[in-house]
Amino acid sequence: MGENSQFLTALMPRPERRGLRTRIMSACLTTTLLINAQLSWAQVSHVATAPEIMPNAELQKQALAFAQEHLAINIQEGDRFELSTGKMDPRLKLVRCDQPLSFQMQNNSARSNRLLVKARCAGSKPWAMFVPLEAKIWKTVVVALRPLNRNSTVRTDDISLREVAAELLTGRYIQSPDLAIGMVLTRSIESGRPLQSSQLVAPKLIKRGDQVVIVATTGGISVRMAGTAMADGRRDEQITVKNKSSKRLIKVRVVAPGTVQAVM
C-alpha cells in the first residue's frame, strides 16, 4: 500500500503533491495540539480537585491555644503551668477541614508531662486526631521547713508554702497551712518534703481516765454532769464516758478539751 501511495503521489502534478503534503502536515499538527490540550486539561483538573493538606504545625498551634485557655480557667489558684507542642508523625496528612475544628481535653494525669488534646473535624471529610502537648505544671503545697518527728504537733514555723512540680507529688498533698497547723504527724517528715493528709491526724483532746464535763441538751434545756473518759478521743470522735453520779456508761462526742456532748 505504501509503495502504491508513493507511486500515485509520484504520478500527481507537482502543485497537487505540495497541496497534499500541506494537508497531511496540517492534520498531524491539529491532532498533536488536541492531544496536548487534553493532557493539559487533565493535569489542571487533577490539580484543581486535589485536597488541601493541613500542616501539622498549624494543627498543633490551634490545639496549644485551646489547652492554654482551658488550663488558665480550670487550674487551681496558686498553680502555674507551661505548655509547648509535642512530636507528631511527619508522615501524617490531614485534609484541611472546611469547618472550624473543635477541641477536647482528655483525662490527662496530673503527674504526667504529656497532655493529649482531641481535635475533631466535622466537615465534608470528617476526621479526628489526638494532638500531643508537652506540659509542665507546678503546684503550691505545704512543705516541712525542718525535719519533723512522728507524734509531734505541727506548728506555724514548721511549714511553708512552696512550688513543687506536679510530677513529683504523690498522695493527697496539702495546699493550705491551716489544714496542717495543730495536727499531729503519724510519721517523720524530712525537711523540704510536702505534707500529705494521710500523714496527719487531729490531736487527742481527751485521754482515757480524764475527768470531763458531759453536756446533754434536750428540748432547749442543757444539763451538765461530771464523768470519766473510758477512751482517748479526738475532735468529733465518739467515745464512752462513765457518769460519776449514776455510774452509767454514756456515748458522747468530743467537742473540746475536757468537754463532751451526749449523743441522744
Image (tube, rainbow, N blue to C red):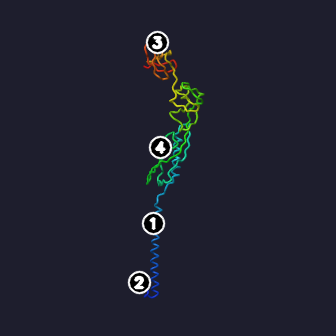
Mark closer to the chain start, 1 or 2: 2
Q: Residue 36 versus residue 198: which sits nearer the camera?
A: 198
Task: Identify the amino acid type marked 4.
Answer: Gln
Task: Find residue 114 and name its label.
Answer: none
Mark closer to the chain start, 4 or 1: 1
- Residues tagged 4 and 2 counted as in contact (Cβ below 8 A): no
Q: Which residue: 45% across, 66% down? A: 42
Name the residue beneath numbered marker 3.
244
- Disc nearest the viewer among 4 and 2: 2
Location of residue 205 in the rendering, given as x and y in whole percent from the top left corner: 51, 20
Name the residue beneath numbered marker 4.
106
Task: Find residue 42 and name its label.
Answer: 1
Other residues around mark 2 within 10 Å, as few (<14) / some (14–19) / many (≥20): few
* Marks 3 and 1, how far apart at CA: 106 Å
Name the residue beneath numbered marker 2.
3
* Marks 1 and 2, how far apart at CA: 40 Å
- Residues tagged 1 and 2 counted as in contact (Cβ below 8 A): no
* Marks 3 and 2, how far apart at CA: 143 Å
- Disc nearest the viewer among 3 and 2: 2
Other residues around mark 1 within 10 Å, as few (<14) / some (14–19) / many (≥20): few
Location of residue 116 in the rendering, given as x and y in whole percent from the top left corner: 49, 45
* Marks 4 and 1, how far apart at CA: 45 Å
